[in-house]
Image (cartoon, rainbow, N blue to C red):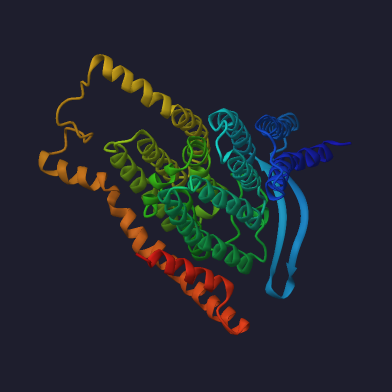
Amino acid sequence: MNVDEVLQWLGRLVVIPPAILLLVLGLSAIFRRPLNERRVGRLTAGCVMSGLACAAAVLGVMLITGERHVPVEFGHWVVIPEEHFHFHLKLIFDRLSVPFVILSFVLVGTIGAFANRYLHREPGYDRFFVCFAMFLLGMIVASVAGTIETLFLGWELVGLSSALLVAFFHDRSNPVINGLRIWSIYRIADAAFLVAAVVLHRLTGAGDFEGLMGTGAWPLGAAALTSQQALIVGLLLLFAAAGKSALLPFSGWLPRAMEGPTPSSAVFYGALSVHLGAFLLLRVSPILELSGALSATVVVLGLASALFGAMAARVQSDAKTALAFASLTQVGIITAEIGFGLRYIALVHIIGHACLRTLQLLRAPSMLHDYHRIENAIGDHLPEGSSGIPGWIPRVGQSSIYRFSFERGHLDAMLDRFIVSPFVAIFRLCDEWEQHWTDFLTGGPSREFSARTTTTETAEEP
């Protein structure tokens, strides 16, 4: 067996353990045969360690042999020649994907071990780990995706698991409402991603990153697009990245995501998911070089998001929300670095920030408990009138800045009015049309309609 065959097998084995974990946990939940907590913990740890070992082996072989670009083919799964479309399942291991997939395995494994104890005997323990396995598979597929459609597959798994875990405590209304809000925003951003994928297929005949970015290994490839085409595709992908990473104007959903359990908050909005938009921009960074206007837009959006996150983080009253906006500040700076062309600095920044924020979010519950004990022992010595706003700002403007930051730029209201409400209204209209159609087919009120009518009438009774 030569080196190429070894790399091919190791590349496949990086993805197989997360897929096995999701398959086993998913089937046990579907057939109502849940595994006990010890087996779930061991299975999760075994799959994560297996995938991590294979990813580390790929890195070792690449360093020894000098390989910088290793494609792993799974073939064409859907082919529509007349529409110039094919679903090409392909993985790629290079200087971007290998560090990111190792980071994903390390942080997911750490948080999985934490959650195994943190959620001990919780009613939703099995449900949490099913969503957790879905997230792991989505992150690994997105990290090593060699085509835009493969990246979209991982992107969707991450988004679905994120919304489900935000709504984890479904016995309360707020988590469910916030999960719906986040899912609605993800749908809008993912639509831009899907349009960008279709446009790329139309322009280049394929969504293969290797063909799109040139023959050179990342980050040395040159995109095979014109400046105008790069601007159109880049703006669509930037819109998708902004929705996934909570950049402006989508930053309002980020504190809402803290409704989920602490382990999911750490892995999603402190470590990995919040950086997935930046990862997308890094993957398509050769496109940014073709358009100065696109690069400038990325820089401006990143700096504006960083400034907004810094302002909002300084005035929040709870630790998790403050950490969420602190994460937004760093993600904004990372986005600006990508716009400036500092790709390796952005990659190192992602790795360092993800590790730090994971520790801070996992430590947040204990930190609050310790802080209250210290405060009770020595008293509160916060200066009177301190608002978190820098003192060099004139007092006339401090109150306005504080109000703007405390209200989070009124982004929640704007997102609800212009994105979430229209999204929900459209689906309610579709649901109403479906009810009328089923009534027509059944010759009377359908069972679903009757059940809803009964429930509504019961709720309206005094």
Res 284 visible: no
* Residue 223, horizontal then vertical, whole percent: 59, 56
* Residue 293, horizontal then vertical, whole percent: 41, 58
Left or right relative to 271: residue 332: left
Q: Quadrant of the N terminus?
A: top right
Q: Nearer the viewer, residue 273 or 220?
A: 273
Q: Work out which residue is located at the far front of the displayed protein and give it.
A: 462
Q: Quadrant of the C terminus?
A: bottom left
Left or right relative to 8: residue 140: left
Q: Residue at x 58, y 84 (%)?
A: 440
* Residue 125, horizontal then vertical, whole percent: 59, 38
Q: Work out which residue is located at the far top of the displayed protein and give it.
A: 377
Res 356 visible: yes
Q: Residue at x 31, y 57 (%)?
A: 413
Q: Is residue 194 above or below residue 277?
A: below
Q: Nearer the viewer, residue 421 or 445?
A: 445
Q: Is residue 288 above or below residue 425?
A: above
* Residue 145, horizontal then vertical, whole percent: 65, 49
Q: Residue at x 36, y 33 (%)?
A: 319
Q: Is residue 405 above or below residue 196?
A: above
Q: Residue at x 55, y 33 (%)?
A: 119
Count of numbered marks: 0
Q: Work out which residue is located at the far left of the displayed protein and give it.
A: 396
Left or right relative to 81: residue 397: left
